[in-house]
Amino acid sequence: MRRLEDFPDVALRIFERPRLPGPADVGNVYLIGICGKGMGALAELFAQAKYKVRGSDAAAYPPMSTRLESLGIPVDEGYDAAHLEPTPDLVIVGNACTPTHVEAAYAREDRLAQASFPEALAHYFLNDRRPVVVAGTHGKTTTTGLAVHVFKQAGLDPGFLVGGVIVGEEATSAVGSGSHFIIEGDEYDSAYFDKRPKMWLYRPQVAIVTSMEFDHADIYDDWDDYRQAFQTFVRLIPQDGLLVLNGDDPVVRSLANETRADTLFVGHDANNDVTAQHVRVEEGGQGFEIVADGFEPFEVFFPMGGDHNRFNALAVAAVALREGISPAQLSAGLASFQGIKRRQEVRGEVNGVLVVDDFAHHPTAVKGTIQAVRERWPGRRLVAVFEPRSNSSRRKLFELQYGKAFDNADQVFISSPPLRHNDDPADFLDPHDVAEIVLKRGTIAETYEGADSLLPHLINAVQAGDLLLVMSNGSFDGLVDKLMARLPTIENL
């Protein structure tokens, strides 16, 4: 993890920021990078709390752009210092901003009250609440959304902030009236002037760690550096708090040695405190029996496929049962969960072709998502379409892992990631090398320069009964919408 002192432009990163005003002293809030998944959720939270909210972003794309529009939150596309006039009472600086970002630099040079995203969340919304923080390399968004849904169904009305739109709730955040505040705990850094992981700032009293696997190679030096971020995180939980760990993963399990809090282990192995038995794949999801210390085993149905989603449900079950939710309430909450947009989200079925949109981008997430949709829709030919868009997924480091991630697909289309100004060409992922590995492992794979060049070839390859799984943690240049528009025009499907 890089320190501010390590940057050549350190003079722009370490500066005296004005003291943050109290909640009663803020009338309007401006967010730089408002369409990011976390920033959009925070914008919604401020709007619900009756602050006037506006912001800017380089590009606005669904689902966050449509969500902000529906809330009446103005978004300026593109960046300009003039957007900060009239002067807001508070500026939230997104972590994508560099010190020379035109709006971030203006806020710094004019000494506007400014905060990072996690700092603002803690300062304005976590006072007098019981924060439940969901951390881990994989599964954070789905697990957080599921926890929110279960707590709401049990009548606890938690506050929450999740980096995705909860289907049915159609919301990414809420102030809530209950004592709990449920947060997706991202391990990415906070701002150009604060390189601490976001999850450190959330004052965790209850926490889940789903998984740990090296990620964010642009932030962390190596595996040890990455692991230390989680070790520090669990040390923040007070002695009377609760830590829920993936007991099937020895590395995650070892975090129990770093905390004073009471610890519960969850997973598929029988030696965990909360586990599942009699697992069966069912139409539309999976059924299993939850076995938890202190409770009689009870049956549940969960409408999401895959081992990883079953673990997500068990982790939420461990927290919910400890926080006073009954097995009956938990069962009802699990069964009625509709998921998160862009997590195995069914976009539609046209001419017999089913289109599923997913946010998967890390190799392990790609592999797990393919497995889950294979289980959920057996018998279909599975065509995986992937864009390596995140800062980590675009690195050569992951080429071999990606090559192995598509084994359960029948055909693979890979879009070449665009080279950004801060990319090192020598360390840049070569999609042709990934496709070569996929081919050698027995799956047809093709690469194309972007969504527009990929789409015609994908259309030509489509067969009746196919499942098209589109995976990207960005907009993929609107590929899913373009695909849905083209499918009705294909003849002879």
Image: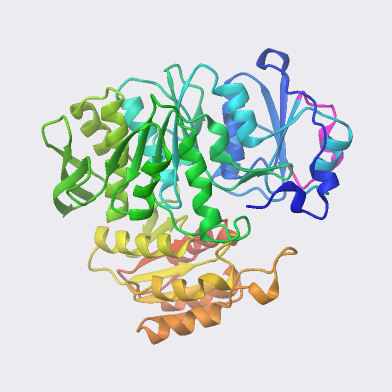
The single residue placed furthest to the bottom in the displayed view is 440
Give the residue at x 40% y 87%: 440
Picture quadrant where residue 415 is located: bottom right
* Residue 54 placement (x, y as % from top left): 71, 32
Question: Is residue 466 left or right of 53 when viewed as pictured?
Answer: left
Q: Is residue 298 visible?
A: yes
Q: Compared to 168, does 158 lie above or below? A: above
- Whether 86 is among the magenta residues is yes
Q: Nearer the viewer, residue 247 or 475?
A: 247
Colour theme = rainbow
* Residue 416 placement (x, y as % from top left): 59, 73
Q: Nearer the viewer, residue 482 or 228?
A: 228
Q: Is residue 354 visible?
A: no
* Residue 219 placement (x, y as % from top left): 62, 55
* Residue 283 placement (x, y as % from top left): 19, 52
Q: Compared to 438, does 375 lie above or below? A: above
Question: Is residue 438 left or right of 200 when viewed as pictured?
Answer: left
What residue range appears in magenta?
75-89
Give the residue at x 15% y 53%: 280
Q: Nearer the viewer, residue 57 or 347?
A: 57
Give the residue at x 32% y 20%: 155
The single residue placed furthest to the right in the displayed view is 110
Picture quadrant where residue 405 is located: bottom left
Q: Compared to 130, does 287 lie above or below? A: below
Picture quadrant where residue 93 is located: top right
